[in-house]
């Protein structure tokens, strides 16, 4: 443990139709645990695939969706997930969508946070939400323990969906700004690495090597080549039973819906100049200039 470091402390619980942060109070960390943190649709499943490939040295048979659960999702019940995590004998890599102050933070674990421009997040989220089927709505809305109103069908107009999300700070899901802001605030911690979707797209092999170095994993050239091949979007869609929760069954179109285009900038043909100005002004107000710039570009301040 690094001396003189002020480590984050959990100060609240977060409950909603998706999440129950209390599960982290009973989670027993191991010193080599890897925590993958994001706001939803920011590259979570992609990063889980990358980490799974690194942990298992490029194996073609890695059941990432099974090995790497969204721990704070309300379903299945906490005892089921906690028992499954205790039973794992390989190095664990776990997903969370919580802001830092609702999470138990371990000084010994390694944390990866991946972010994406909020407009790209919404375009990916809309596909996720609009293609959700009865299985998804049943799990989210009807499972015991839900807090708050149920989630309904999204509007047909994606611009309206974006504006509702912007005006409602993440509506109908959860706060975007507080999630990004909370992780940005601790970005200098020695066991946290900040990542960006655009940087992963621009240089996936280089980013994978850097992530491996951070995790203490150095694959040889042959393994790295396999890892890169197994982390492409086409590969992940084709192997949805391994990479996507429940093989994609809660969405019409299955894995091809969940692992969608992986393309940024689709909002450019839909949002008006005023919409973009409003989003960018809100990003600066909520995050500050440096963080807003990083969120839009992936460029960290020097």
Image (cartoon, helix red, strand yellow):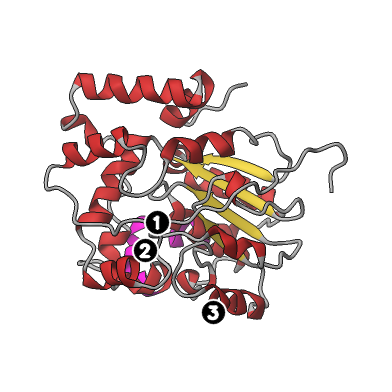
Q: Earlier in the sequence, mark 2 or mark 3?
A: 3
Report the span colored magenta.
227-241
**First reached walking from the N terminus: tag 1 or tag 3:** 3
* Residue carrying label 3: 80
Q: Is residue 154 above or below residue 266?
A: below
Residue 86 found in image quarter: bottom right
Residue 250 x %, y %: 28, 70
Residue at the spot x=23%, y=24% of the render? 275
Residue under circle 2? 235
Residue 42: numbered disc = none
Q: Residue at x 65, y 36 (%)?
A: 186
Residue located 27% across and 56% down the image: 128
| Label 2, label 3: how far apart the Cα atoms are | 30 Å
Q: Tell me whether the residue at label 1 lies in contact with that at label 2, contact meaning CB atoms closer than 8 angstroms.
A: yes
**Residue at mark 1:** 232
Q: Is residue 167 above or below residue 144?
A: above
In the rendered image, which quarter contains the C terminus? top right
Answer left or right for 279 relative to 155.
right
Crowding near the residue tagged with mark 2, few <14, some 14–19, many ≥20 C-alpha atoms within 10 Å: few
């Amino acid at each position: 443990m690094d001396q003189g470091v002020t480590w984050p402390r959990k100060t609240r619980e977060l409950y909603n139709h998706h999440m129950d942060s209390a599960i982290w109070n009973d989670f027993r960390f191991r010193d080599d645990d890897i925590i993958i943190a994001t706001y939803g649709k920011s590259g979570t499943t992609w990063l889980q695939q990358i980490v799974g490939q690194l942990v298992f040295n490029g194996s073609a048979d890695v059941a990432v969706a099974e090995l790497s659960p969204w721990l704070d999702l309300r379903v299945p019940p906490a005892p089921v997930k906690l028992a499954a995590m205790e039973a794992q004998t390989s190095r664990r890599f776990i997903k969370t969508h919580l802001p830092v102050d609702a999470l138990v933070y371990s000084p010994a674990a390694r944390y990866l946070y991946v972010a994406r421009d909020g407009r790209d997040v919404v375009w990916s989220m809309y596909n996720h939400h609009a293609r959700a089927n009865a299985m998804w709505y049943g799990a989210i809305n009807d499972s015991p323990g839900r807090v708050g109103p149920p989630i309904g069908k999204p509007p047909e107009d994606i611009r309206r969906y974006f504006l509702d999300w912007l005006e409602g700070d993440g509506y109908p899901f959860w706060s975007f700004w507080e999630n990004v802001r909370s992780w940005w605030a601790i970005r200098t911690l020695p066991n946290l690495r900040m990542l960006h979707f655009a940087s992963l797209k621009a240089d996936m092999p280089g980013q994978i090597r850097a992530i491996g170095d951070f995790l203490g994993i150095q694959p040889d050239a042959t393994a790295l080549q396999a890892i890169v091949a197994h982390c492409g979007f086409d590969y992940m869609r084709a192997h949805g039973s391994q990479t996507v929760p429940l093989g994609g069954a809660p969405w019409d179109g299955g894995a091809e819906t969940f692992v969608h285009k992986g393309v940024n900038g689709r909002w450019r043909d839909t949002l008006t100049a005023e919409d973009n100005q409003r989003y960018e002004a809100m990003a600066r107000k909520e995050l500050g200039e440096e963080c807003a710039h990083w969120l839009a570009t992936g460029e960290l301040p020097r």
